[in-house]
Amino acid sequence: MILTSSRYFKLNKTSSKIFASKTVMATSVRPNVYLTRKVLQPAFELLKNKCKVTGWNEDTVVPRNHLLQHVETAHGLYVSHLDRVDEELLDRGRNLKIIATMSSGFEHIDISACKRRGVQLGHTPDVTSEACAEMGVALVLCTTRRLIEANRHVHDGHWPKDWDLMYMCGRSIQESVIGIVGMGGIGLSMAEKLMPFHPREILYHNRKPNEKCDAMGAKYVSMDDLLRRSDFVICAARLGKETKNMFNAEKFALMKPTAQFFNVGRGGLVDQDALYDALASKQILAAGLDVCTPEPLPKEHKLLTLPNFVLLPHISSATVEARIQMATLTAKNILAGLDGQPLPAPLP
């Protein structure tokens, strides 16, 4: 993550600098921590006080060869969802005690390989839930009320001079049926935030019923039942072997022709060819995504030719507060792992 506008930050009275810009050389007795990207200053300060910190200091993903070379001397590794942690990396990082990812998801990490080597793993689960849920609700509103399409009309000079009764009409959330697949922190928070819009019903599907969801009046149903009944289908599930491409042609065929689909989980949860076919044939009404495969999506991709498709550049956790919390929690996970203490946010 790169933030360039310092006017949004005031970390202390003397400096608004938010990124660490150079490697801190500490004594040889300190453990080595390698950073795969620039980190926010509060997290960097936590680490440099107790560790020797080195890392990739460019505004790009660290080259694989560079990472493999420098992980050889690392005791702690600070990564993001763009860094692949696999057998090859772990074979090089024989001194690793702790790997912490600045992300809630962990599909980029070979968990079993880490466990075999006794490497602890941390992530940043709950600190992003509110930010992601806010963005999820914004995406629903943006798509169903056709905000991007309408704004494009303003800029392109297509705003009609004469009032048209049905011009830019969207669908209302009021009295609708909302279906949420994946009722973790993000799904639950989205359900809570959508309640004031007065939907008729909120349905959810999870690995098992969630007491918090039941208490707020949401109903646990099967996946297929949710798809058949919902006007708005929201995917907030985790990506794994069992959920990869879980939204495919078969699932889209179950949805209403007036239904709209949203994904705030991971791009790999959706078969994008099947989504394109469903949208182009009007099998479903519209879709709004904050994630896709690959990222970024090529500008010539066929999905981007559709007027009923909205895509955001994976910004669901992009609030200043959430990113600072993510960065510092990642640093705290590393420090705890190096100190032999329980991690504040271990991987399950």
Image: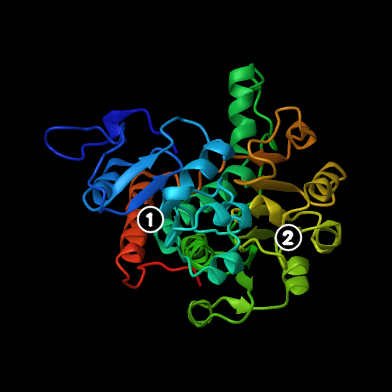
Q: Viewer-nearest of labels 2 and 1?
A: 1
Is residue 39 in view from this perspective?
A: no
Residue 162 is tagged as: none
In the picture provided, is 286 more to the left or to the right than 291?
A: right
> In what quadrant of the picture does the N terminus appear?
top left
Q: Between disc 2 and disc 1, whose residue precedes?
A: 2
- Which residue in the protein does label 2 denote? 244
Question: Relative to the observer, which residue lies in front, 265 or 107?
Answer: 107
- Among all residues in the image, which is located at the extreme front? 28
Quick check: 110 left or right of 4?
A: right
Residue 95 shows in this picture: yes
Frontmost residue, 101 versus 250 = 101
Scheme by which the image is coloured:
rainbow
From this viewpoint, which residue is outermost toward the left? 13
Q: Please rate how many residues cluster around mark 2, counting C-alpha atoms within 10 Å: few if below 14, some from 14 to 19, many from 20.
A: some
Badge 1 amino acid: Thr
Residue underneath mark 1: 330
> At which x and y percent is residue 206?
63, 74
